[in-house]
Image: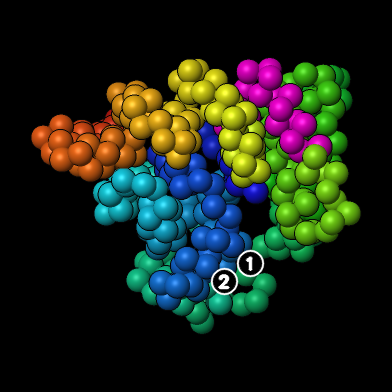
Amino acid sequence: MPRPWKHPDLPPGPLSELNRALHELHHRAGWPSSREIRRALDAKGVPMSHTKVHDTLTKPVLPTKGAVEMITEVLAEKVRGADINTEIDRLLGLWQAAALDNSSPSPAPVPPDESAALPDDPERPPDEARTPTDDPPTAKQGGQRELPRQDNLIERMRREKAENGDTDAMVELGSSLQTWGGAAGAAEAESWYRRAAESGHTQAMLNLAVLLEEEQEERGSAALWYRRAEAESWYRRAAENGHTQAMVGLGALLEQRDEDDEAAVWYRRAAEKGDAGAMLSFASLLKQRGDDEHAEAWYRRAAEEGDADAMNTLAALLEEREETEEAAVWRHRAEEASRSVLSRLVDRWFRGKS
């Protein structure tokens, strides 16, 4: 079922902005699975693995330029009214800003079977420089990566706080374990998320729900049906406690089951809290119902919040009615919004170097 992917722990900066933009575009596209994106890439002659697709959005490192470009193209094609070239230019601009930032972690080496997917990628290492042991083991393989020394110290401090009942530390520790600890780390992360969630921590509820869903999807076992039900219950608890992202996730889950009435309730609640993605999802649901007037109002509200995708969608609606003058205004504003993001990042980078 469609759902948001986990966000990596990243400090504020160009890489965080790039990752946020990728996740937002993934949201606008309806949260397609990594395998669905991989199939779309295969159709374009780009045989990228679903693991690399997932890692591009979820790993705390700078992804390769080629991966960002191709994944952006696939996602933008799924967003109604999106200008594909504009989206690619916007995301590549963000990638360039992150690449110029020395604090952005470098990408992991590209596995041999994926190197052909990105022939023009300057970050791809020469094939002869690689060995089968170059790649860190994945969580599915039960692999465990070593934390940098400073992060080891931070994790020990988090663990001490978590063991003393600090729910924020429980969530932070769980996120670190899930990212770095392989299969064993994910299992321990679940226990920490659960402890914090049962104490009322809404982010822990969302993290636990996502982790449970990932587990049942990867195993694909009918015996894990109850894990899916439990995941939904945690989404619901987090949403009922006011967590906007959980509201959107629950809305998507309900919409997938054709429970559109309740999905609309959660989308609207998140939209009224200012989530532009929820505004778009709610508007899309309204349009499917034939309520074009209210759908356009929500598209317009998201556009007025500065969302470039909403601006392009609104422009497309106006063009359908041949209101080309206003449509052109929104197209122009969408381009300006995309450029302003890049301008702010570049300006921030230069200020940091001065």
Relative height, residue 102 to residue 341 (above, below)? below
Residue displayed at 73% across by 46% down: 213
Read off the magenta span: 230-249
- Residue at image coords 74%, 24%: 237
In the picture shown, does residue 136 fall above or below 163? Answer: below
Name the residue type under label 2. Pro
User: What's the residue at 57%, 58% (across, down)?
Assistant: 34
Q: Report x, y in % for residue 176.
A: 70, 40
Q: Please state which of residues 46 and 92 is positioned toward the viewer in this rendering.
A: 46
Question: Badges 2 and 1: C-beta atoms under 8 Å apart?
Answer: yes
Percent x, y of residue 325: 11, 35
Q: What number of labels is visible?
A: 2
Residue hosting label 1: 135
Q: Is residue 228 visible?
A: yes
Residue 239 falls inside the magenta stretch: yes
Q: Quadrant of residue 149?
A: top right
Residue that numbered label 2 is attached to: 111
